Amino acid sequence: MNNKISLLVVALLVNASAFQQASSILDGRSKLRGSVRQSTILKMSSSIGFIGLGIMGEGMAARLLSEGIAGSEDKPLVVWNRTPSKCEALVEKFPKKKIIVKGTAQEVVQSCGITYSMLSTPEASKAVFESDTGVLAGVSAGKSIVDCATLAEADMVRMNTQVVEKGGRFLEAPVSGSKGPAAMGQLVFLCAGSEDLFNEVKNDGLNVMGKASHFFATTVGYGTRAKLVVNSLMGTMLAAFSEGLALSESVGLDPSKMVEVIGQGAIQSPMYNLKGPKMIVKDHAPNFPLKHAHKDMKLACEMAEANNMEFSITGQAEKLYREAREDTDLNIADEDFSAVFETVHKKSKSEFSRKRMS
């Protein structure tokens, strides 16, 4: 009897040991599978997305690649553009970088943790953001969108609400700067929204695309307000400069000499020094298209009106840009906003202006 009990105890002990070993193996396999899944998730979320490779987006995406923020095997840059050739050109420009081209904006967002978007107009932004295969369709919990376009404040607020409702994070980040600064990493980011997201990207993305990043508030809309103030002032400055330069020419002053003189006094501006010499010779190759400058001027005027502000000087400048944009004879809407200079001359009746326009 005692021998039978002893044998039974031994058998139970052996089975218990085997069970523990089996459990240990299964637990190890489970942990391994979990580790593999987690690694896959981390690898996917470490990808950086970029939507919109136009005049601004092309330079910004290139900076992320050239400065090593994205483009490695572990951290590829995932891109989409309405014109696919722009994506192909970026791949050809950086043959040693890991760039993944997707067929839709939705796919970019789905495969990345953080996605930057830089689209040119409110219409383009809304279409890409809200389409069935757009940005919002790819948003889920944990996804982050950094939108760098200049839109109406209401557009940014709506986009933020839509992203947050799906469990994502949203950073409003319009930029001050044009094609040249974008290519050289000299933009200024004007941000609002998710402060946590801002803190994540300010030294791991924004810092290579821009020379400064400012966070105004956790309330989306403040970044757009700042951008419209900046761009409306810039547009008004260039309109006034155009009139001054045209007047100089019309009274017989050397315009190149006047650009030099202006650059030596209290009213000097890098913009005048950069654009003045080109304006004189009718070189308006687009860095910041006139139609986009007018869009920002119009939005700023609407913001001023909504807040009961005196804004008549800027309002007159907006009118001048509108005339320039709508002038089918000059056909300068897609030229640089410095082409407003041509409208000033067209509206003038001086002998010099008539000769210039003939």
Image (cartoon, rainbow, N blue to C red):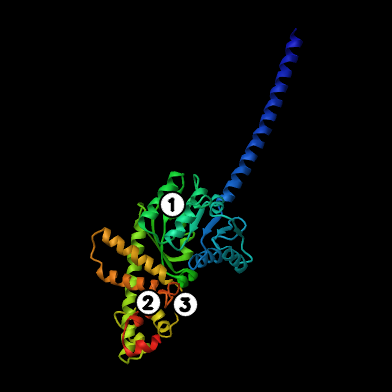
Tell me which numbered mark, 1 or 3, is placed earlier along the sequence.
1
**Considering the numbered disc 2 on the image, is that residue within a helix, a strand or a loop?**
helix
Q: From where the camera sits, is residue 202 visible? A: no
Q: Which residue is mark 1?
A: 170
Residue 340: assigned label: 2
Q: For the residue carrying disc 1, how many other residues have a C-alpha within 10 Å: few (<14), some (14-19), or many (20+)?
A: many
Vertical arrangement, residue 183 with respect to residue 81, above or below: below
Q: CA distance from mark 2 to mark 1?
A: 35 Å
Q: Which residue type carries mark 3?
A: Ala
Q: Which circle, 1 or 3, is nearer the viewer?
A: 3
The foreground one among 203 and 213 is 213
Q: Which circle, 3 or 2, is nearer the viewer?
A: 2
Instruction: Find residue 131 and report its horizontal and vertical position in percent.
Output: 50, 52
Residue name at image x 61 percent, y 63 percent: 97
Vertical arrangement, residue 308 with respect to residue 140, above or below: below
Image quarter where the C terminus lies is bottom left
Residue name at image x 63 percent, y 66 percent: 95
The foreground one among 139 and 122 is 122
Tell me which numbered mark, 3 or 2, is placed earlier along the sequence.
3
Q: Which residue type carries mark 1?
A: Phe
Q: Which circle, 2 or 1, is nearer the viewer?
A: 2
Q: Which residue is mark 3?
A: 285
